[in-house]
Structures are given as structure tokens and as C-alpha cells.
Image (cartoon, rainbow, N blue to C red):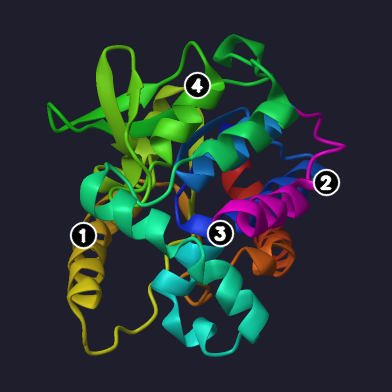
Amino acid sequence: MRNLSLALGGGGVRGAAHIGVLRALSEADLAPKAIAGTSSGAIVAMLYALETSERFGGDTYRHIERIGAQGYAELRLLFHPQIARAVTLSDRLKVLAGWERVIRGGVFGAGMVSQEVLRSNLIAMIGGARFEDARLPLAFIAVDLMKGEKVVLNSGSMLEAALASSAIPGVFPPVALNGQLLSDGHIVDNIPVDDARALIGNAFVLAVDIGDHSPPSVPKTALDVILRSAAISRDHLRRSSLARADLTLSFADVTAGSFEYERSQELAQIGYERTLALIPTLKAALEKT
């Protein structure tokens, strides 16, 4: 049987689907031998690699929900204004209290919101873990903003590498690491198939695509145009990566905003159920010589 290696794509809170994917694979005795991840794919890969297969998944999505509720409510309303119309007045007032910080960070700083909420929660979960502490080979993808080059992180601080891989440009400030200024890896390789293959010999790469590929609406604001333009670029890179995978598990039809953290459990369950359906096909493919 070939060695299963996963390429976990980024996509904000849709990364919770990876939790269900990994839980289903472990239950089917198909736990991956290596994982390469980008952005939220890197964060989930990190948590999985530092936890036993038997315990992983039970509370992981709850951690994601808590992180979102504690620190990123402003972003949820900024990027999903239709949600803003549905929240209560008291919730809206709480969020408005943070808008000055968001605007100031976006105009005069390197990011709208700091990653300190995410950092502090991950420290509580994994401490000072390093790649060398993981129970399987890992690689996280980021981009060097100064050189414009893809960076593969696979040694040293796992936390800093995951934060760099998930530092969404313009939203979170870039991370200074190893003499480089790093930002979200989705810019260069959102589904790192080649890196997953390079992690282990005789690799069979399952690519997990959690990107939001819902039909675009007509851009009405400058922000809409910026986001749509970035989505087109990511889609070209995505199709190129998936063409090199041995098998793809897609969540392209699952619509969820990048900061809808309260849907973490739902997305994890979707990931679990779709992976269960894929297990027979995956087993047959792994057993082929």
C-alpha cells in the first residue's frame, strides 16, 4: 500500500472541514503519513500532528469557534455585510466599538487585526511545540513578501510557521521569521500537492480543496473587486495544483464565509461525512501498485 500524504488547502473557517477529514481517515485506519498545509490547512495539520488520532477532533472545532468569537467579530461583519443586518443591536454596538482599531490598522498599519488572539489560544493548546515534536512529517506554505517567493516551513517553531502561513494579506500583519517577511501561502500555493508528495517516499497525495468556489456576484464595491480579483488568481493556481494530485476531495459547493466561526462544527461534520463516502475509492487507489 502506498503512503497517504495530504495536501490541506486554506479557506478561512472552512478549514474546519479538515478536522472531519482527518477524523474519518483515522477511524478507517488510513491516517496520513505526512501533511502539507496552507493557511487554515496548516493550523489544522499542526493540531492533528501534536494530538493522538484517537483524541483529535472532539474539541478542535470548539477552539476555532472560541477564537473567532473572541477576536474577529469585526472581520465577520466587514467581509459579510449580509450577516451584519441580522445581528442584534447590542452585538452590533460591541462590534462598532472595535471599528476604529480595524480602520486604523488597515490604513496606517500592516493589517486590520493582529493575530494575538489566535496566537494566545494556540499557545495554550500547543505551547512551544516545534516541527521536530510532530508525530508525522509536516510542511506549511507561506510567501516571502520581499522576494515574492514561495517558502516551505518545516523546522523550528510550529506556531510561528502556522501564523505566517495564515497571515491573510491586508487582514493580518505579515510575520517576521527566519529573516523573511512572511504572509499567507494561498498567494502562491493554496493546495500544496508537490510539497505533500516530497514529504515521504511512495506518496499517494490526497488534495483537500476547501476553497469557496460559489458563483460570483457582480462586484459593487472596491472591496468586492479586490476580493474577486484575488479569487480569480487563486483559482488558476488551484486547478494547476489539483491536476498533480492522485485524488481530490472537494468542498467547492460548500458556501461559508471565511470568518463564520460559528459554523465550525457543521463544517467539520461535512468533512467527516464526505470523507467516509470517499474511503472505498481511496483504499482501492492506495492498494494499487
**Which one is closest to the eye, mark 3 or mark 1?**
3
CA separation in Å, label 4 and label 2: 22 Å
Real-space CA distance between mark 1 and mark 4, rounded to the nearest whole angstrom: 27 Å
Of helix, strand and loop, which one carries label 1?
Answer: helix
Residue bearing the label numbered 2: 27
Q: What residue sits right under mark 3 in the picture?
A: 13
Say few, some or many: other residues with alpha carbon within 10 Å of mark 3 (under 14 / 14 to 19 / 20 or more).
many
Residue at image coords 26%, 26%: 181
Q: CA distance from mark 4 to mark 3?
A: 28 Å
Q: Residues within 10 Å of mark 1 (few under 14, many from 20)?
A: few
Query: From this viewpoint, which residue is outermost toward the left?
Result: 147
Question: Circles 1 and 4: CB distance less than 8 Å?
Answer: no
The quarter of the rendered structure image containing the N terminus is: top right
Q: Residue 261: x percent and y percent?
A: 62, 63
Question: Which numbered disc flags the more N-terminal residue, 2 or 3?
Answer: 3
The type of residue carrying mark 2 is Glu
Residue 145 visible from this viewpoint: yes
Residue under numbered circle 1 = 236
Tell me which numbered mark, 2 or 1, is placed earlier along the sequence.
2
Q: Nearer the viewer, mark 4 or mark 3?
A: 3
Q: Which residues are magenta?
A: 51-72
Question: In percent of the image, x 31 and y 53: which residue is there?
Answer: 104
Q: Earlier in the sequence, mark 4 or mark 2?
A: 2
Q: Which mark is residue 200?
A: 4
Nearer the observer: mark 2 or 1; the answer is 1
79 shown above or below 208: below
From mark 2 to mark 3, how far is it between C-alphas?
A: 23 Å
